[in-house]
């Protein structure tokens, strides 16, 4: 045999060994285990130190948590906890309701509206009775009955309206003047007696036709004439027995509100209009007049302040101006 066949075969095995640290995965697992054990013992301690009522509440909460939270009732802490689980809505106070949902509030509103409607009905009934009484007075008085065509009574939204109109051959006033005819005085005085029996306030307005006023002093027109006639009528109502304090408004409207708009020069447009006002109209007139007075007062104050400011402002005159003013001051 050759030498090569007698040589032994050597097999080398390379053994790999870990060098340095052996890794840290086991540390993480150990930390998780210790944390779980700590949580377990903490839970056991809490359960051991918790009262039976608290335990029952916790148990009930986890059985039906949504029901307890939404509908209230017995829940966590019913036995000994200061704050009970569930219960009523804490955002809503005991007995608190919306005004619109309050039946008592609705009832009061309905009662108030009913009371207002009843007062308005009674007031309208009084005005109708007053109208009937005036018509009966006119029919029973021979002197008034002959002027029945010149007396027009109707119910308007402002109240009872009594109109005394001119006829072509039977005027209420002297032509172009404010002097009442004797029969017109009788009519107004009889009406004044009846009007004093009601508590309503009175509004009186004078009207003319559209014919321009030609006589009299300069600047005197149908406006002044209608106002003078209205005031003369007011005096006769008071002379008949009506309290002067019942009169709330006396105005002259000239030909601005004709009775027959299609015939502006007609005699029927010359009239005296008396309105027995209802409460709504009276309040409206009173508020409007009060607002006008306040506005005029503010204007007067502003004008006075402006005038004072002008007076306090020093003015300089030239010598020529002083000489021109001096002789006139003597």
Image (cartoon, grey):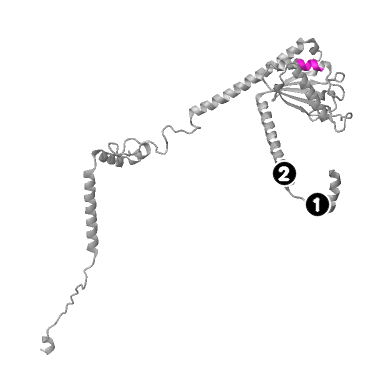
In front of the other: 186 or 1: 186
Q: Is residue 260 visible?
A: no
From the viewer's perspective, tell me whether residue 328 is left or right of residue 277: right
Picture quadrant where residue 35 is located: bottom left
Picture quadrant where residue 125 is located: top right
Other residues around mark 2 within 10 Å, as few (<14) / some (14–19) / many (≥20): few
From the viewer's perspective, tell me whether residue 236 is left or right of residue 174: left
Residue identifier under label 1: 317
Residues at marks 2 and 1, CA–CA distance in whole angstroms: 20 Å
Outermost front residue: 330
Residue 93 sits above or below residue 149 on the image: below
In front of the other: 325 or 121: 325
Residue 178 in the image: x percent, y percent?
83, 23
Residue 20 in the image: x percent, y percent?
21, 72
The mark total stands at 2
In front of the other: 153 or 289: 289
Helix, strand or loop for disc 2: helix
Residue occupying image coordinates x 69% and y 29%: 285
What number is the disc on residue 308? 2
Residue occupying image coordinates x 79% and y 10%: 142
The boundaries of the magenta stretch are: 184-189
Helix, strand or loop for disc 1: loop
Residue occupying image coordinates x 23% and y 62%: 27
Q: Mark 2 or mark 1, which is nearer to you?
A: 1
Q: Earlier in the sequence, mark 2 or mark 1?
A: 2
Residue 323 sits above or below residue 209 on the image: below
- Of the 4 image quadrants, the one containing the N terminus is bottom left
In front of the other: 225 or 269: 225
């Amino acid at each position: 045999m050759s030498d090569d066949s007698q040589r032994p075969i050597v097999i080398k095995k390379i053994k790999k060994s870990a060098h340095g640290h052996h890794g840290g995965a086991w540390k993480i697992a150990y930390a998780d285990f210790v944390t779980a054990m700590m949580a377990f013992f903490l839970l056991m301690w809490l359960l051991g130190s918790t009262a039976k009522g608290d335990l029952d509440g916790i148990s009930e909460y986890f059985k039906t948590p949504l029901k307890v939270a939404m509908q209230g009732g017995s829940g966590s802490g019913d036995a000994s906890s200061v704050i009970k689980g569930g219960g009523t809505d804490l955002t809503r106070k005991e007995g608190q309701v919306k005004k619109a949902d309050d039946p008592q509030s609705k009832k009061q509103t309905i009662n108030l509206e009913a009371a207002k409607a009843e007062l308005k009905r009674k007031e309208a009934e009084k005005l109708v009775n007053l109208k009937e009484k005036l018509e009966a007075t006119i029919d029973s008085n021979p002197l008034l009955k002959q002027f029945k065509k010149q007396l027009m009574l109707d119910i308007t939204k402002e109240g009872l309206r009594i109109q005394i109109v001119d006829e072509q051959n039977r005027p209420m006033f002297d032509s172009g003047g404010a002097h009442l005819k004797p029969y017109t005085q009788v009519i107004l005085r009889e009406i004044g007696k009846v009007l004093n029996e009601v508590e309503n306030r009175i509004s009186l307005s004078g009207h003319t036709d559209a014919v321009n006023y030609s006589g009299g002093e300069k600047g005197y027109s149908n406006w002044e004439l209608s106002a003078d006639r209205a005031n003369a009528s007011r005096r006769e109502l008071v002379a008949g027995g009506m309290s002067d304090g019942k009169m709330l408004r006396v105005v002259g409207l000239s030909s601005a509100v004709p009775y027959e708009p299609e015939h502006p020069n007609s005699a029927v447009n010359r009239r005296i209009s008396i309105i027995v006002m209802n409460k709504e109209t009276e309040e409206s007139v009173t508020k409007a007049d009060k607002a006008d007075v306040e506005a005029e007062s503010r204007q007067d104050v502003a004008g006075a302040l402006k005038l004072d400011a002008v007076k306090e402002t020093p003015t300089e005159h030239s010598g020529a101006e002083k000489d021109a003013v001096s002789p006139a001051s003597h």
